[in-house]
Amino acid sequence: MDVLTWLQELPEYAIVAATGLLVLGEGIIGVGFFLPGEAALLLAAAAVGSIADFFLLWSTAVACSVAGNVVGFELGRRVGPPLRDTRLVRKRGAESWDKATLMLQKHGAWAVFTGRVIPFVRNVVPPVAGAGGLSYRMFLPAVTAGAAIATALPILFAMAIAQGARGAGAGIVVAVLLAAAIVVFVMYRRRRR
């Protein structure tokens, strides 16, 4: 039995719950260096068989990702810049921390959105935003939009491969990419004002 067949035979709630936990962990600094949230999304997407399944997996992934990012944000707010000097961050993510800090200083909430979409930077962006004093009012919309796109893309990619990009798979891809484009456009317009 291959992995895809095995995944498709698992109960849907087990796949969604396990994926949600991995994505939650990936959003927390330190834990995110070790947990494969994106890999979990790719594997779980192979078991998606309908639009309803896609939206269940995607909404769970977005909620768990945002929750993990809020934990990281709070760590940044409470510990502050000294978090960058911890052994774990110095060893695994100092360069990403520094890139995220520069992005945040230059672009504010837009950097949170952009950084949330970039792998290898995404799990340090929330604590950097917290340590940098960004407000929740600026942080939450940006991190939610970024999480929505960052979780949709691997799911859609895996679905397109698993389903041959036909029928419902292609429709979902077009709908989510259109929604992502609208979110990016609205955020860009707000930032310009």
Image (cartoon, rainbow, N blue to C red):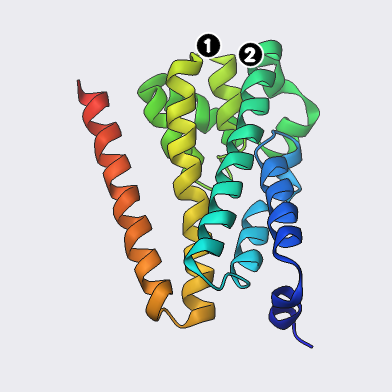
User: Which quarter of the figure has residue 121?
Assistant: top right
The quadrant of the picture occupied by the N terminus is: bottom right
* Residue 99 screen position, x and y as percent: 51, 32
Query: Which amino acid type corresponds to the residue marked 2 in the rendered image?
Result: Arg
| Camera-nearest residue between 129 and 184 | 184
Residue 29, percent from left and from top: 69, 33
Does residue 139 appear left or right of residue 63 in this picture? left
User: Eyeballing the image, is 162 above or below 26?
Assistant: below
Instruction: Tell me how far mark 1 sits from mark 2, CA to CA.
Output: 7 Å
Residue farthest toward the bottom in the current orientation of the protein: 1
Q: Nearer the viewer, residue 16 or 97?
A: 16
Residue located at (56% from left, 40% from top): 122
State which tag comes first along the sequence, 1 or 2: 2
The label number, if any, that marks residue 39 in the structure image = none
- Please give the name of the residue rendered at 27% of the width and 25% of the height, measured from the top-left corner: 191
Mark 1 vs 2: CB contact within 8 A: yes
Q: Position of residue 95 (x, y in %)?
A: 59, 35
Q: Is residue 26 left or right of residue 66?
A: right
Q: Which mark is residue 77?
A: 2
Look at the image and tell me whether residue 162 can be seen: yes
User: Could you tell me if residue 36 is visible in this image?
Assistant: no
Element under disc 1: loop
Which residue type carries mark 1?
Gly
Residue toward you, 187 or 103:
187
Is residue 61 depicted above or below 114 in this figure?
below
User: In the displayed structure, would residue 99 be above or below residue 33?
Assistant: above
| 149 left or right, relative to 14 | left
Residue for badge 1:
133
For the point 51% across and 42% down, which residue is it? 147
Secondary structure category for the residue under label 2: helix
